[in-house]
Amino acid sequence: MNIALLSHDAKKELMVQFCIAYKGILAKHDICATNTTGRMVNEATGLPVSLYLSCAQGGHQQIQAKIAYSELDMVIFMADPLVSDPEVSSQVLQIINACDQYNVPFASNIATAEMLIMGLDRGDLAWREVIRRRNK
């Protein structure tokens, strides 16, 4: 499965800790991430991470395109609900909308991310492979 990781600045350490905790599961899958988040995850875990631009430079748009082309099976975006910048809030909303439109499982907090990652490990997301094959 292809998993995208994104996080706001205040949640980057939480993302790193999440990836350390679930490294065994994540290692079985392909991971991509926006630049800073991906580098931090890679440095802390040793997991290979395909890097995209930072969100400020358009990384969220690269992730959105991958969602639209059925190239992602899960998106974990550790979002900071206290961010007051409307542009940053808009980026999160755009990712959520893309995931909703293309039926891609999405987590915006640690509780939901853990549920998705455990489901992934159990095989609950195998239906994503059918979607991906159908859209090719």
Image (tube, rainbow, N blue to C red):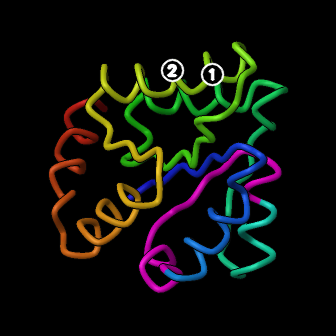
Residue 70 location, quadrant: top left
Mark drawn on residue 93: 2
Q: Is residue 67 above or below residue 72?
A: above
Amino acid carrying mark 1 in the image: Ser
For disc 1, the neighbor class at 10 Å (few under 14, some 14 to 19, many from 20) is some
Indicate the quadrant containing the C terminus: top left, top right, bottom left or bottom right. top left
Horizontal relation, residue 58 to residue 14: left or right:
right
Horizontal relation, residue 16 to residue 3: left or right:
right
Residue 126 location, quadrant: bottom left
CA–CA distance between discs 2 and 1?
A: 6 Å
Mark 1 lies on residue: 89
Q: Is residue 51 above or below residue 80?
A: below
The residue positioned 50% from the left and 27% from the top of the image is 95
- How many marks the image carries: the answer is 2
The residue positioned 63% from the left and 46% from the top of the image is 6
Q: Position of residue 84 (x, y in %)?
A: 72, 23
**Magenta span:** 22-38
Mark 1 and mark 2 in contact (Cβ < 8 Å)? yes
Q: Is residue 27 magenta?
A: yes
The residue positioned 80% from the left and 37% from the top of the image is 53
Residue 18 location, quadrant: bottom right
Q: Secondary structure at mark 2?
A: helix
The residue positioned 37% from the left and 29% from the top of the image is 99
